[in-house]
Amino acid sequence: MKKFLYITMVLVVSLSFVACGSKPTTDASKATTTTAVTTTPAKITYTKDLAYLPTYNGVKTATYTAKTKKAPATSKYTLKSTTDVKVFNDYQAILKKDGWTITGATKSTTIFAKKGTHTANIIVQKMGKDVILMISSK
């Protein structure tokens, strides 16, 4: 009987430590203040080669191949010291802000978008500390 009570007490004490330690307590007597951060919307700029497509934070084209009857135009950009997730989320937001409809997306790798008669396939690829942004569009 003592063994049963001992095991039960150990379980109760252990569970109370786990339950109490999972959420930090807040002191109601301390006043917390939050400051609102207002950001001015960035002006959307467009690529030189694909005048209807917004640029990603003003980067310059590394390579460009013009559209042909069989193939869409392609542009390749190298973005220094960033992450693929950040580029993916930021560029998707830029496209939406510019009126593009996201028709498909694979998390952090590809975006398919459409605006009017234009379509764009965007591939985001992590290369070391840099990110390669490849866009095929017509």
Image (cartoon, rainbow, N blue to C red):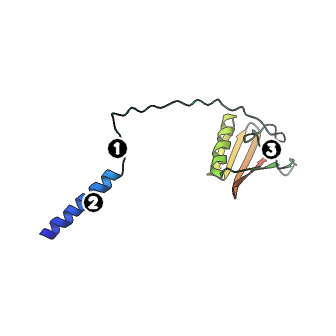
For label 3, the residue is: 60
Q: Judge the density around disc 1: few (<14), some (14-19), many (≥20) Cα neighbours within 10 Å.
A: few
Residue 134 visible, this angle: no
Nearer-the-camera pick, 136 or 130: 130
For label 1, the residue is: 25
Q: Which quadrant: the N terminus?
A: bottom left
Does dot 3 land on a helix, a strand or a loop? loop
Nearer-the-camera pick, 59 or 99: 59
Residue under the image location 53 percent in, 30 percent down:
36
Nearer-the-camera pick, 48 or 82: 82
Q: Position of residue 25 (x, y in %)?
A: 34, 44
Q: Position of residue 66 (x, y in %)?
A: 87, 47
Does dot 1 land on a helix, a strand or a loop? loop
Q: Nearer the viewer, mark 1 or mark 3?
A: 1
Q: Is 1 on the left or on the right of 118, as rendered?
A: left
Identify residue type, mark 2. Answer: Ser
Q: Is residue 99 above or below residue 87?
A: above
Q: Nearer the viewer, mark 3 or mark 2?
A: 2
The earlier-in-sequence mark between 3 and 2 is: 2
For label 2, the residue is: 14
- Residue that lies at the very extreme toward the front in this rendered image: 30
The earlier-in-sequence mark between 1 and 3 is: 1
Identify residue type, mark 3. Answer: Lys
Identify residue type, mark 1. Answer: Thr
